[in-house]
Amino acid sequence: MLTSSDPGNLRRGRLRYLPVVPGRLEFAEEVRKAILTERPQVVAVELPATLEAPLLRAVERLPELSVILYTAKEETIYVPLEITDPFIEAIRSAQEIAAEVFFVDPDVGDRPHLSDLYPDSYAARRLSYASYVERYRLNPQPSSFDLKRHAGGIAWKLQSCDPLAEVLVVISLNLLDPVLDAMQHPQAEPLARVRREGVQVLNLHPECLAEILVEFPFLQSVYEARRYGLVRCEEDTPPHGETPPEEGTLRLLAHTLEAPEKDLERIVYRCARHADWHTEPKALHPVGEDLAIPTPPERFGFMDRQRLVFRLFAEAERRYEKSTREKLGHWQRRLFSRYSRNLALIGKNLVAGLFDQTVAARSIVDDNFAWEFWNLGASHLYQKESSDLMTVNISGEELWLNMKRIRLRRRLPREKARVRPLGLKGRKKEKFRGEWAAGFDGQGICSYPPEDIVLENYGLFLKKKGKSLLSEERSHTEPFSTSLLDGIDIRETLRNWHEGCLYVRQFQRISGEVGAVVVIFDEDPENRYSWQMTWLGEHTQESDMAFYSTNPYEQVVGPGITRAEYGGFLLSYPPRRMMDVWHDPDYLFAESKPETLLLAALDYTLERFVVYVAAKAPRSVFKTVASRLGKKIIYIPIGQLSPVSLKKIRAVHILDGHDKRPIAKDYLW
């Protein structure tokens, strides 16, 4: 006997109706909860009996997704099966409790034209399922002959069901009231098809899932991971039996080459733990193990779609930072939320879909981040290209009307680049795992000359800017009397316009030059930039350089080519004079890596001034050290410099020998 409360008074004798919105996550959760809680003897689903065998075959393959293909009136019909579809969830949950599945939709050809415009299904989570159904029924679908005939066919099937069994009817919300009206009277058997020939069950290609599914693939993967509610405790720990890497370049390179499938699995379960509607993380079932008993009703946890979007953004940000070594600001996260919210409101939704979220990601950050976001959202943990069934790659235009497109370029087009009809040339990839790691022989390392030129030019710019700032500090402004001095001070003249006189400025000439430049991007309190190096200039036009950066061997971008991100660096001219500053005992009293670089700059410069660029000025003790050495520190806040220019010089590529320089241009980005 069904004992749960019946929202909306949808019980009619032995039949309890559960209206749903097809294809939506929130209603699939309601169906599963109702079946596991009430355990009906029969579950009636609004699916045609002529497709019963193909549907059961496709459900058997879940969580691998399938598409049912058949021909009707010389048209090809595609029916993709989704994990988060309420009707598919009804079949799966009914099979778990050994209930009979009853297909009640008559195959009468064309279904009646009904509006599929439902309020955003996320409202069912915010308002409650019962309130959502009740408010939708206040504005029923307009009645028609086709609608009544179709509802009568469903009612006939329900009236022919076992009269002694408790039946849960899973039906579309827009058909609920017509079916309830039809059930008031005995119905005749409709003139419907009883058999359909040529029906195929095919495997879907992973690349087409994001275009053809109602719910995006990553959300369906998370739902499947949460579906059984079993414990999965490991967060970011290595897989069972895996040991930490030993010292050495090749060992470290081998450790960093993790399979994409394993990385996606960890991301899915990490998001599943934090996507619960309540704050308590739910226990999860690991991939590859036997399924256990379904979750008890009292422990059933709903999923929060909005929270999952935030987790997806965080995981995409993690991949973006690993790929580009760039961090997102808090203002970008806030603007992404606001932008995606506005796009959702334009589409009359509460939460934006994957496409609109990708548009917001590209608009707020860049194409690289949007690509990471879309690529992760379009990933399905359980879908494989190879299968026992034929695999098909279906375009979204074959299923949906008015498809929207977005073009993402992971690399910006270069100036004066020739037109490429097939789009921009993508980054090269390894033919097999470990191919690029084999290009390291460990005989020596060097830099890439075009990057050195850019860095040296920026160092010259900072030297000139440092002297100009010092000159402005020592400038003198006075009313015009006999000489214009170094020119009219427009700002001071306008400020004192009421006096009716001109003001002129005199710049004091600065004696001395800038001999060293220190640029600090990150003071590195968490030791993220652990790789330290001192390089000597190769010719008289290059400076000696000391820097600390991320470990370049964690990001291999080509055969014998690695990429790192500066945390800070020192440029000192003339070259060929600098020793290893990181192990120099004269700098042991430095409390951080930036202070070590500043001490080395004061020690090695032959000129009077040292330019120091950072977020914070150096401690006052360094002014004393500089004055005792006859030097002066010119501090430039890094916020005064162009972030675009700083971005260009922050990445460094390290080559495993001079022989890699001719091929490096094909792998650098």
Image (cartoon, rainbow, N blue to C red):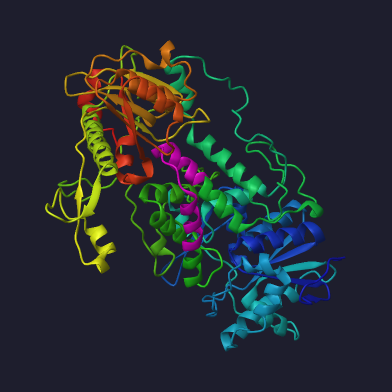
Instruction: Name the foreground residue: 29 vs 461.
Output: 461
In the rendered image, the vertical position of residue 251 relative to residue 87, given as above or below: above
Identify the residue shown where x is 67% and y is 76%: 154
Name, please, the residue furthest toward the front: 481
- Any magenta on residue 328? yes
- The total number of labels drawn is 0
Q: Position of residue 518 (x, y in %)?
A: 34, 30
- Identify the image quadrant of residue 187: bottom right
Identify the residue shown where x is 41% and y is 55%: 364
Q: Position of residue 227 (x, y in %)?
A: 68, 50
- Identify the image quadrant of residue 50: bottom right
Instruction: Name the foreground residue: 411 vs 630.
Output: 630
Instruction: Name the foreground residue: 203 vs 261.
Output: 261
Q: Position of residue 450 (x, y in %)?
A: 21, 31
Image quadrant containing the C terminus: top left
Residue 433 visible here: no
Does residue 164 appear to the left or right of 116 in the view shown?
Answer: right
Instruction: Name the foreground residue: 293 vs 465.
Output: 465
Main secondary structure of the magenta stretch: helix
Identify the residue shown where x is 76% and y is 62%: 34
Image quadrant containing the N terminus: bottom right
In magenta, the rendered stretch is 315-339
In the rendered image, the vertical position of residue 518 relative to residue 138, given as above or below: above
In the rendered image, the vertical position of residue 288 relative to residue 245, given as above or below: below
